[in-house]
Image: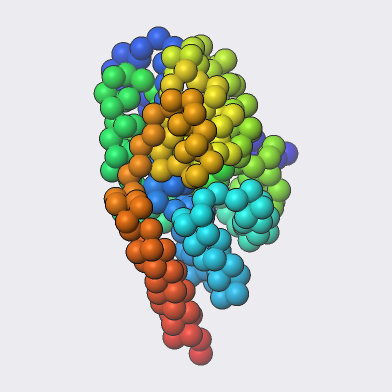
Amino acid sequence: MPEKKSVAGATPPAVAQPIGEAAFFDVDNTLMRGASLFHMGRKMYERKVFTVRQAAGFAWKQFKFVTRGENLADVHSVKDAALAFVAGIEVADIKALGEEVYDEMIASRIWPGAKALAEQHLRLGRRVWLVTATPLEVASVISTRLGLTGALGTVGEVEDGKYTGRLVGDILHGPAKAVAVQQIADDEGLDLSRCWAYSDSYNDVPLLSLVGHPVAINPDARLRRHARDRNWPVYDFRSGRRAATFGLKAATVGGVVYGLWKSFARFRGARP
């Protein structure tokens, strides 16, 4: 029978929890710069799970994501490709890969300001959950490494310790995040009017609107307008956001090109 799981958690903080209060953080472009799944894909490419052409597709979507914001079509495109890639792969291997990806690529991309907000909630005794379309195994690594309470992420179906290439439920994105958080609130007796939620994307308005304290972090243009119209707090941790827009795009392109070149060079060097 397929194994089912929807939430992964670390040990809750020792501080007494304020009754009914918690904080929920999106991951990509909110807690970290860029898309976590891109870095997982890059690492899988290095392991020869897929081709240079497919890697270039991941890189292009990462570039658009960092510079333009989240696009639903790209999210589902990456999801479909990722499911095809992992079919037949051991769950233990993906978990180990997630640890490597965090150490090598994600840790340095965590926004210090967003991390500080999460740590402040923890110090005050609130539980802090990640809520992301990122695969649960990767989200769980990020949550554990940052000392958070747990993670809600997209769940891949597993049989006999291997991924089948299918999902349990749907990708945890947009309105699905609000449904997942409502379930956590029901299970843990949370008062959502006393909870916080953080995101960069207009797609997460259902989640942000569910809590009493919605906060926009590094928001896309639509979310920035939406937050402004409703007097929601806005934090932008992208240093010199307006002045450095061109530099950010150039650096992103350079990073993508360099990463692909290095990976391709290693691939060619490994060929007999």
Residue 57 percent coordinates (x, y): 59, 67
**Which residue is painted at 68% across and 44% down in the image?**
167
- Give the camera-side residue of 129 and 231: 231
Q: What is the x, y in percent for residue 113?
A: 29, 39
Residue at (31% x, 13% y) in the render: 16
In the image, taking residue 31 as reference, residue 84 lies left or right, namely: right
Seen as rendered, the residue at the extreme bottom is 272
Q: Up-down: is 261 above or below 118?
A: below
Quarter assignment of residue 124: top left
Frontmost residue, 142 versus 119: 119
The quarter holding residue 158 reads: top right
Whole-percent x, y for residue 206 in the image: 59, 29
Q: Residue at x 28, y 27 (%)?
A: 120
In this rendering, does residue 40 appear at all? no
Does residue 21 appear to the left or right of 202 in the view shown? left
208 in relation to 79, above or below = above
